[in-house]
């Protein structure tokens, strides 16, 4: 599914590590490498500064393009250099113009104080209404990306997928899509009961969820996909994050369908809450008809 991806680069060592990882993911055929130069609003010397920065960026593009070609000569690289005051809007516009399947961004830490602040590119991209799928990679994962860490979160990123579900049609379609990924090993299905459900008829609610999860497992099994089901209770974002750690998953796979960070994903939890509370990569599936 993810054959053409967009990566935002600033030509740093961290950006290069992202490129190392992405070229290892099975199925990618083309990378749109985007660098956005912030539009300088200055009455004196603005054009000179922009031309200098643009010239330096073009040279860096050639270095990264050659580097990517050494990593994987079969992946086509399309560089995009744009001057703009709206980085988030530029990312989405470039993704749509190039018809990419996935935008890959990075998050520098956990929680609101550690990198996903309102107004930051990462948070703004999740909040903008869009039909573009997004993969959020954790800074700490990329920093320690060697050996087994590299294998799990790059070429084997779909080896153990955590799919939370609230049994909506959108959730079920997202799970079915996860089963089509190259290299899928196991899908872990998760349903989170609210504390209120646990107070009133907890056993009955859990049993009903187990029955519905079993039906999804049967559908996956018919396609030769191994899966397990978990029913737990709590705040959805915390439960998803905790389960991801306990089960040592390679990626969390959730649906948003283009409704932005205010979209209720599970029982009042937002997709943004899930991203902010986990240490694992998160793929947000959007815009499927």
Image (cartoon, grey):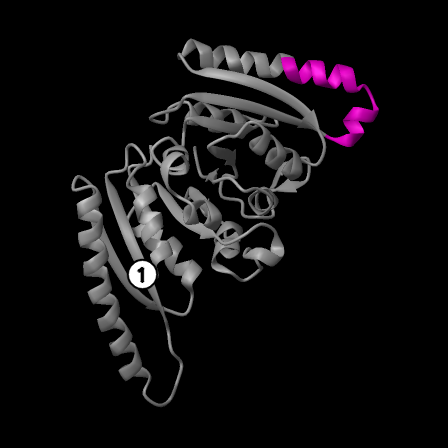
Q: Main secondary structure of the magenta part?
A: helix
Q: Position of residue 52 (x, y in %)?
A: 25, 78
Q: Nearer the viewer, residue 278 or 225?
A: 278
Quadrant of the drawing holding the C terminus:
top left
**Label 1: how many residues lie within 10 Å, few (<14), some (14-19) or many (20+)?**
some
Q: Closer to the camera, 65 or 199?
A: 65
On the image, which quarter does residue 47 sit in? bottom left
Can I make out residue 93 in this image? no
Q: Is residue 160 visible?
A: yes
Q: How far across and how far down the image is residue 266, in percent?
A: 64, 34
The single residue placed furthest to the front in the displayed view is 147
> Which stretch is magenta?
194-210
Q: Residue at x 34, y 43 (%)?
A: 21
Q: Residue at x 61, y 55 (%)?
A: 112
User: Which residue shows up at 76% across the image and 15% down it?
Assistant: 204
Residue positioned most to the right: 199
Q: Which residue is mark 1?
A: 11
Relative to 67, is 211 above or below?
above
Quadrant for the N terminus in the image: top left
Image coords of residue 205 (percent x, y): 73, 19
Q: Please tell me whether residue 157 is drawn above or below residue 77 in the rendered image.
A: above
What's the residue at 30%, 51% (across, down)?
97
Residue 17 covered by magenta stretch: no
């Amino acid at each position: 599914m993810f054959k053409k991806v967009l990566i935002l680069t600033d030509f740093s060592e961290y950006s290069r590590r992202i490129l190392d990882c992405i070229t290892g993911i099975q199925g990618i055929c083309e990378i749109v490498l985007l660098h956005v130069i912030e539009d300088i609003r200055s009455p004196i010397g603005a054009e000179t500064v922009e031309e200098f920065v643009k010239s330096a960026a073009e040279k860096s593009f050639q270095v990264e393009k050659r580097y990517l070609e050494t990593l994987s000569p079969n992946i086509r690289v399309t560089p995009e250099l744009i001057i703009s005051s709206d980085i988030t809007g530029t990312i989405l516009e470039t993704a749509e113009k190039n018809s990419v399947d996935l935008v890959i961004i990075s998050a520098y830490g956990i929680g609101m104080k550690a990198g996903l602040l309102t107004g930051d590119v990462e948070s703004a991209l999740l909040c903008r209404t869009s039909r573009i799928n997004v993969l959020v990679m954790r800074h700490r994962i990329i920093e320690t990306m060697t050996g087994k860490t590299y294998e799990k979160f790059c070429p084997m990123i779909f080896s153990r997928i955590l799919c939370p579900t609230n049994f909506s049609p959108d959730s079920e379609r997202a799970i079915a899509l996860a089963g089509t990924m190259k290299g899928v090993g196991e899908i872990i299905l998760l349903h989170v009961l609210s504390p209120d459900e646990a107070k009133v008829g907890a056993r009955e609610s859990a049993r009903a969820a187990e029955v519905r999860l079993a039906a999804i497992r049967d559908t996956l099994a018919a396609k030769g996909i191994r899966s397990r089901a978990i029913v737990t209770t709590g705040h959805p974002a915390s439960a998803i994050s905790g389960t991801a750690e306990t089960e040592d998953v390679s990626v969390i796979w959730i649906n948003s369908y283009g409704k932005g960070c205010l979209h209720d994903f599970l029982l009042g939890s937002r997709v943004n809450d899930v991203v902010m509370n986990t240490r694992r990569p998160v793929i947000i599936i959007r815009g499927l008809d």
